[in-house]
Each structure stands twice: as C-alpha cells, then as structure tokens.
Amino acid sequence: MAIWILLLAFLLYAVFSSVTVWRSGVPGPWYNNVSSLVLKYQEWTRRRRQYVHRLHSVYGPVVRLAPNELSFANLEGLKEIYQSGGSGYEKTEFYDMFKQYDHRTMFSMLGREEHSQRKKLFAERYAMTNIARPDVLEGIAARAAAVVSKCRDSIGGHLDAYWTLHCYAIDGVSHLLFNPGGTDTLNDPKQREYISELTYYDNYRARLIEMYMPFIAAITDWFCPPALLQSQRYVLAQAEGASVAPAAVLHRLQNADLQPIQAAAECMDHMAAGIETTGDGLCFLMHELSLPRSRHIQEKLRAEFCQNPATRLDDLQYLDAVVREGLRRFPPIPMSLPRTIVSCSAYSLHLLNEDVFPDACVFRPERWLDKDKLPAMNRLFFTFSAGGRGCVGRNLALLEMKMLIREVYTRFRTSLPPEMQHEMEVDDQVVASRPKNFKALLTFEEAPI
C-alpha cells in the first residue's frame, strides 16, 4: 500500500510541476515541460547544438529545453545572463568538470567574488599592453615563422593543418604563460605527445556521465586513480620551479598567495583553452578561405598585406574583418555556457539574428567594415562570451590568429586536396567544437609576388 501511495505522490508532483512550468508561458515542445530526457538524449548523441538551434528557429529567441532549463538567442538574454551586475548570473556545477589537478581555476570557480579575485591576479598579463611587448611578440612571431616553414615544405603535397595549427596554438599560449620558455611542439618531436593528449581525444560521453552521474565517476576514480598526463607533468614542473620573465602569466601566479599546484592548475586551464579557441578557430577559418568561393578573400587579404607591410596587425581592417567573420560563423566554443538554469550559445546568437547579421549563414567579412552596423554586431558577438567572466585570453587569441593569417597569406595561396572538397564536418564536445576525425588538410602554392 505504501508503495502505491508513494507512486501516486510522485505522479501528482510531476503533474503539478509540469503544469507550473507550462503556465510560465515559455515556448517550446510540450515534452520539455515534463522531462529533460529529450535534451539528455540529444546531448548523448552529440546533437545538442543543432537541437537547441532548431528549437530557436521554430519557437523564437527564448525556448524551454527542460523543466529547469531555458535557452536565449537574443541580445536581451545575453546582457541579462552574462553582463548583469558586471559578471552575470552565477555558474552551475557544470563547471566542476573543468577542474585541473582537482583544483578550481578561474574558469571553473562558481562564485562571482572568488572568480573576480583570481582574475585580478593575472588579467593584466592578457592586456594588449603586455601582449604587445617585444619579447612576447617575438616569441609568437617565431612560432608563426615555424608554421610558414612547414607550409613551404608541404608544397607538392598537403599539410596536416589540424596538427600544425594546434601545435602553433599551444606553443603560442605557453610562451605567454612561461615566457621566455614554453613548448616547442612544432619542432621538438619529444613534445608532440602534449598535442596528442590535449587535442586527439574523445572524452565527450565520459564528461556527460561525470556531469549527470558523478557518483560513477567518483567510484571509477577511486578504483583506478587517473595518472597525470605528460602535458600535466610539464605544466606542474614549470609552476614548481621555472624562472620566468615579468611578462609571463606564471610570474604573477608565483608572486600571489597560491600553492604551486594551484598555479599549475590555472596555467593548465589557460593552455587547454588556448589550444581549442586558436587551434580550432584557425582550422575552420583557413578551410573556409581555401574553398573556391573564398579565393577572392585570399586575394583581398594579400593585397592589404602587400600594400601595408609595416602596418600594425590591429590596423589592418580587412584582416580584422576576416578573423571576426571566421569566429562569428565558426565559433570554437559554440555550445551553451550555462548560468544557473539559463544560457546562450554563440552558434545560435550568430546565426539567428538576421536583423544584425543579414544572410547569417554566409561567410562575408565585408559586413564588419560597415561602421554604422559595427556596434550592433559587436554587442551580439559571443565567441569569447561576455561580461566580467568573458574569455580573458581574447587579445592573445586574436593576435595569434591575425599574425598567422598575415604570415601565411602574404606568401601562399591555399586550396583543398581532393579528400577535403566539401564543408568541414564538425565534432561537438561538451563546450567546444572541432573538425571531425581531427581532419583538416590544406594544399599550398607560392603566391605571385
């Protein structure tokens, strides 16, 4: 009898909760008022991004994803969720997955105050005034030159751009972290395991299990404690004893009230994030530029570079437009970034607001040259998130991308080998997206002088 009473009570509670949710008036499929199972199924099958985007296309800028989760694809939602009060709504336990060495970093800290205090330790190191220092610029330029050398060596065949661009990304961000040191995966075969560990993996479903059934992950870790990866050992060794320049991020962390393991966790988090944003972003952008439809964009870039050989990167307007359009159309972090029960995704924000981005699915850098429309586009540009918790490495990522695009397209034309003559397929991870099967091949030819 007691079992039937409990079952009836559960059913009544479910019905009452569903009616309450339905009466809130937020549009969406009826079943999302009742259960989150459909959303979880879409996540398990790697279709969350497309599913959320499709719901917005049908129901509008605000949709219900589950009884306790909403998604927004408009400026009002972006500002409220991520910018209200300076840094927006509180984060959820979703970010527990992004601890490093079992320590919280700025990205995985849930509270506003602790996030703000941690950010103050090193935010200045990511400001343009620091990144533009000669020793920092020279280090990144040396990495770009190494990529150019590999491009030239590949002429007559093709270049594994996925590998090369992710090496460039990790070498660039680690240079800022550990200046004058940092990785040299582009040239040192012994360090290539770092790239294999940080970019050639697929732990998507393991992350979902950790998120929704943390007790299973805890039991697994108890029986089989995970060993440190080589890349984690490298970063920990740097944090424990490296002598770094004042411009390095680690320099600030070493002089703060942090244990070496906490400094290592922060650096490891920055390095992993830098690989995904810059490496994947460059893959998608250079693939688009190499399509026949974008050959004219290559020519316009080369003309700007040749006519302005001594101009600062930030003053090259068409280069800036191309990079921004690449990040708008192919955001490396396209998934929802949850705050309590609400979120926005760069993918839907950038493609559904056609009043701001006309023909949003078309790659059109020229849209960023319209100064009258630029403020509205910048407000909706969500590639680096927004508000006080937006990506602290934004300036570094943009500099790395612009520098490499200038160095490559001043010297070469790129196209696609036969096996890549199509739109690049996307493989969604928990928050990031990357080329499917780690495949991004490009062919290079010397550009006419």
Image (cartoon, rainbow, N blue to C red):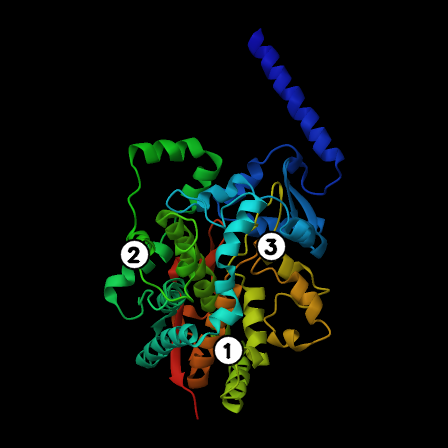
- Residue beneath disc 3: 388
Q: Is residue 300 above or below residue 442?
A: below
Number of numbered discs visible in the structure rendering: 3
- Residue beneath disc 2: 241
- Residue 292 is marked as 1
Residue 68 locus on image (x, y percent): 63, 36
Residue 31 locus on image (x, y percent): 64, 36
Looking at this view, is 49 or 315 the one in front?
A: 315
Distance, label 1 to label 2, CA atoms, is 50 Å
| Quarter of the figure with residue 404 | bottom left
Q: Residue at x 64, y 74 (%)?
A: 368
Q: Is residue 297 left or right of residue 89?
A: left
Give amino acid for label 1: Pro
Looking at this view, is 380 or 446 the one in front?
A: 380
Q: Callout 1 environment at 10 Å: few (<14), some (14 to 19), or many (20+)?
A: few
Residue with the most extreme bottom position: 449
